[in-house]
Amino acid sequence: MTKAEIQLVRALADKRGRTQHGLFVAEGEKLIGELRTSQLRVHKIFALEGVFEGADVETVAPRDMERLSLLKTPGNSLALVEIPRYALDPATLGGALTLALDDVQNPGNLGTIVRLADWFGIGDIVCSEGTADCFNPKVVQATMGAILRVRVHYTDLKRFLCEAVARGIPVYGTFLEGENLYDAPLTPDGIVVMGNEGRGVRPETAAAVTRKLFIPPYPADRRGSESLNVAMATGIVCAELRRRK
């Protein structure tokens, strides 16, 4: 293992480095095993002896894996993977359920949402340009492999949603002033917008929402927490939409 390889892995901890090299880091035997059978292209694998075999594998000592790893507790393998590029067209989303994230910042929340999308059979997540990078090492690990199956896009979210509305695609969003989620008329398809952890959905994005929804507490008049964690709220909305279907 060369000094240049160590520097490359370190550079990929930062979004600028990932953009420059077109690579992201994945760690752990299970995740890398899934990567090798996915459509994503694995550039190189660093692994302890006996973990992986192949022309793309470089065997390293435990102390070198500790130097390479971007995690607090290093695993037995680390892969450099090419960042995939997906086409995004609102016209292709008709008849499907899609998530839209408006400046979601926390990597753990984003990773959990990608994992939720995978669980509920949602193939696309459309993110505002201010949303956390889905190939941040913390996000990749939090997805537990779901990042291999869910297509994550970054775009001008307001413009994208306006184009979707013009095509007749329902756009839902969660708001404190919205209709009760369990009483509102819902379609099994459409776009669900989830907002920033602190600010919620931005006003310019909210303008494109065609139906505002509210997740009620229990009992309905109870005074408790001001809001739900964005990943938890996403799971509740997705579960109700899938139940309706």
Image (tube, rainbow, N blue to C red):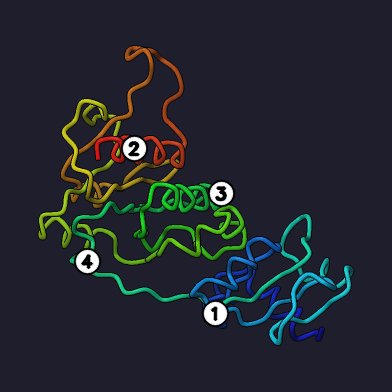
Q: Which is more foreground, mark 2 or mark 1?
A: 1
Q: Are marks 2 and 4 in contact (CB under 8 Å)?
A: no
Q: Which residue is mark 3?
A: 108
Q: Where residue 165 is drawn, which disc sits there? A: none
Q: Secondary structure at mark 4?
A: helix
- CB within 8 Å, label 2 to label 1: no
Image coordinates of residue 76 in percent, x first then y, are 78, 64
Q: Which mark is residue 41?
A: 1
CA distance for labels 2 and 1? 33 Å
As measured in the structure, the alpha-carbon distance from the residue carrying label 4 to the one carrying label 3 is 29 Å
Q: Position of residue 51 (x, y in %)?
A: 78, 69
Q: Secondary structure at mark 1?
A: loop
Q: How many marks?
A: 4
* Rendered view: 227 above or below 91: above
Q: Who's the residue at 56% across and 57% down the image?
A: 139
Label whose residue precedes the other's in the sequence (2 or 1): 1
Q: Residue at x 40, y 53 (%)?
A: 103
Q: Which of pointers 2 and 3 indicates the residue nearer the eye? A: 2
**Above or below — where is 111 with respect to 179?**
below
Q: Nearer the viewer, residue 148 or 102?
A: 148
Tell me the element at label 2: helix
Give the numbered dot on residue 92.
Answer: 4
Residue position marked by numbered label 2 in the rendering:
237
Hey, which quadrant is residue 175 in on the image?
Answer: top left
Q: Earlier in the sequence, mark 2 or mark 3?
A: 3
The amino acid marked with disc number 2 is Val
Mark 1 or mark 3: which is in front?
Answer: 1
Give the class, few, some or many, for how many residues have Cα within 10 Å of label 3's Cα (few <14, many ≥20): some
Against 215, residue 239 (above or below) is below
Please give the name of the residue rendered at 51% of the width and 48% of the height, measured from the top-left corner. 112
Residue count near mark 1 (Cα–Cα under 10 Å), binned few <14, some 14–19, many ≥20 = some
Amino acid marked by disc 3: Gly
